[in-house]
């Protein structure tokens, strides 16, 4: 791989905030995720769970719940407003005061014609969904306590509302009284944190007494109680075919219930049975979505977990592996290679640091408050771009002649900055670009996509290079393709034009284009083997991909002009150490 002086940088205090809400759009296969800082993230589950869009948050905008209506996204929060988002310009489209105090929940009917919100003042408010906005329609009967959770019946004619000690079914006379729990908790009110309303009029609720309860919505009677935790049941989600419900608790567990026969001898008598428990979180699980092949969860520990349901797969494979999305799928660190400066991007500010010696410390020069303004790279791009999707990647050539941009429609445009005109459009590939860079001497554009494919495009000749064609013809090694985090940065070694440097969260890679490409029989991770070989034996084992996993939880890798590497790490332990203490959990033999 070569010898490099290394600056290990750990003073970028990147700190994600807790996940508060999520909503999955089955038609577009997009997951919307809302965080405690008011930001919204959009993940494309059809493209390797790639985080394709981020809408910045602000202190005055809270998010308690998210809701899709077709391709439109709405949120509601404790500031008492409903917000619709502009998913092209990545900002709120408008916000509407609901005049019911803090809003705890928002949901749409299956027809997409109405939104219902649950308010602090005890009202369920209905809004009609119009072409460009929403319009208040009416209040349902006002209740004495706040409305915490809502679920429409699939027919769109009834709504189940979770409150304190009670579930109310509107457009009917049913009122379901929730037991306050067991032991000392009987003296406290029970909060119905989540409800789901099934097509057969079964209602399933989760509450602060640790219970999952099954109700007959026709008669208002309790069918069964499952005590799943001593703490809160915070979230519920039902599968599309209503055969499975998943439950999130404040202990960090996710529990699955399935509608099955309890024994082989009782095949005709199906009931809701607890079948599996997953422990992938350290803190509250506040948001859940059960999709066709997986359970998606998030909460106070800030990570998004995708746990595939193994029965949905014919065999164990990369697609059936557990995924934890812990870092953004974009670069947050920018390096001035000659000056030795680092620019850190935070949600609300930028910090500029000067590198010191290789001791992990640096000098903080300044910080700048961030204000979003539309510059003149943006109007220019919109004039030529056929897509209305936002730019998420941009890179320029060292000589200042070329500028390349990528958007979430997978389009890559190359501009001649000196002539102020579009130079070419790279052939569209079906996976979103996650990183790209322009070579300082050849001006070739290297692109890496969410599915881990790599392409090299000659800007001058407006075609893929011979090396790129050879790579695509032979194919990338399976161990490269099976990685579960995207490459977020591409750079080059000016003193060795054959080398491309790139990284993801878990590894740093140098691709040496002068060496043969590895085939499927090649030992891909071969660094330890190479060290054990003699100088005479080593050349026959070399290949183009040189992988280093010494550095973990990587946010950025850059090569300075003095040939020293800058490794910006953010250990996950540093993030978890700043989280609030989790609720008390049972330990072995206690």
Image (tube, helix red, strand yellow):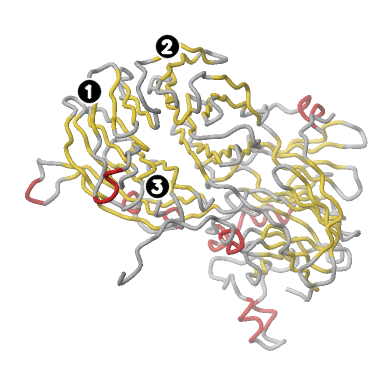
Q: Secondary structure at mark 2?
A: strand
Check disc 2: other Cα within 10 Å, few if <14, some if 14-19, many if 20+: few
Check disc 3: other Cα within 10 Å, few if <14, some if 14-19, many if 20+: some
Query: Which residue is pictured at 64% across the width and 36% down the height?
Result: 59
Q: Position of residue 586 (x, y in %)?
A: 35, 63
Identify the image quadrant of residue 113.
Answer: top left
Q: Secondary structure at mark 1?
A: loop
Query: Which residue is pictured at 53% across the width and 70% down the height?
Result: 521
| In front of the other: 297 or 438 | 297
Above or below, comparing residue 373 to residue 400 in the picture: above
Give the distance between the C-alpha atoms of the residues marked 2 and 3, in whole angstroms.
Answer: 37 Å
Q: Position of residue 319 (x, y in %)?
A: 45, 53
Relative side of 246 to 128, left or right: left
What label sits on residue 294 in the rendered view? Answer: 3
Query: Which residue is pictured at 17% across the width and 42% down the height?
Result: 271
Give the distance between the C-alpha atoms of the residues marked 1 and 2, in whole angstroms.
Answer: 20 Å
Check disc 1: other Cα within 10 Å, few if <14, some if 14-19, many if 20+: some
């Amino acid at each position: 791989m070569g010898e490099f002086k290394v600056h290990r940088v750990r003073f970028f205090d990147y700190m994600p905030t807790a996940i508060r809400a999520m909503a999955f759009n089955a038609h577009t296969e997009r997951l919307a995720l809302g965080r405690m800082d008011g930001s919204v993230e959009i993940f494309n589950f059809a493209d390797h769970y790639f985080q394709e869009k981020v809408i910045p948050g602000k202190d005055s905008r809270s998010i308690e719940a998210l809701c899709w209506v077709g391709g439109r996204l709405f949120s509601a929060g404790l500031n008492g407003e409903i917000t619709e988002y502009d998913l092209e310009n990545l900002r709120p489209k408008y916000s509407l005061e609901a005049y019911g105090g803090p809003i705890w929940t928002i949901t749409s009917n299956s027809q997409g014609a109405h939104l219902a919100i649950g308010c602090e003042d005890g009202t369920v408010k209905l809004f009609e969904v119009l072409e460009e906005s929403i319009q208040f329609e009416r209040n349902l009967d006002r209740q004495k306590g706040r409305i915490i959770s809502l679920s429409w019946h699939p027919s769109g004619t009834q709504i189940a509302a979770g409150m304190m000690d009670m579930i109310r079914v509107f457009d009917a006379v049913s009122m379901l009284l929730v037991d306050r729990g067991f032991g000392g908790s009987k003296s406290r009110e029970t909060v119905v944190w989540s409800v789901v309303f099934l097509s057969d009029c079964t209602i399933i609720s989760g509450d602060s007494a640790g219970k999952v309860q099954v109700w007959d919505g026709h008669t208002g009677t309790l069918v069964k109680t499952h005590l799943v935790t001593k703490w809160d049941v915070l979230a519920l989600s039902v599968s599309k075919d209503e055969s499975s419900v998943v439950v999130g608790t404040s202990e960090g567990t996710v529990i699955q219930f399935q509608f099955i026969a309890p024994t082989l001898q009782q095949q005709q008598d199906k009931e809701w049975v607890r079948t599996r428990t997953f422990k992938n979180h350290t803190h509250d699980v506040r948001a859940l979505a059960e999709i066709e092949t997986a359970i998606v969860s998030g909460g106070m520990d800030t990570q998004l977990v995708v746990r595939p349901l193994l029965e949905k797969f014919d065999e164990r494979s990369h697609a059936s592996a557990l995924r934890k999305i812990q870092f953004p799928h974009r670069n947050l660190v920018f390096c001035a290679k000659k000056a030795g400066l680092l620019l850190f991007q935070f949600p609300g500010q930028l910090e500029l640091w000067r590198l010191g010696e290789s001791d992990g410390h640096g000098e903080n020069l300044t910080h700048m408050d961030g204000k979003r303004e539309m510059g003149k790279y943006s109007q220019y791009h919109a004039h030529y771009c056929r897509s209305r999707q936002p730019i998420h990647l941009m890179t320029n050539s060292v000589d200042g002649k070329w500028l390349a941009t990528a958007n979430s429609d997978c389009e890559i445009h190359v501009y001649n900055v000196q002539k102020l005109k579009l130079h070419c459009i790279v052939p569209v590939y079906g996976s979103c670009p996650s990183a790209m860079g322009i070579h300082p001497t050849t001006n070739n554009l290297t692109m890496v996509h969410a599915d881990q494919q790599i392409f090299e495009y000659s800007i001058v000749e407006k075609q893929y290079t011979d090396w790129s064609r050879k790579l695509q013809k032979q194919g990338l090694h399976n161990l490269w393709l099976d990685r579960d985090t995207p490459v977020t940065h591409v750079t080059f070694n000016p003193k060795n034009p054959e080398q491309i440097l790139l990284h993801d969260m878990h590894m740093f890679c140098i691709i040496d284009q002068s060496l043969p490409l590895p085939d499927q029989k090649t030992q891909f991770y071969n660094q330890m083997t190479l060290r054990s070989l003699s100088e005479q034996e080593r050349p026959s084992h070399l290949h183009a991909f040189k992988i280093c996993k010494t550095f973990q939880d990587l946010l950025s890798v850059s090569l300075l002009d003095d040939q020293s590497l800058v490794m910006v790490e953010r250990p996950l332990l540093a993030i978890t150490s700043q989280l609030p203490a989790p609720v008390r959990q049972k330990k072995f033999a206690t």
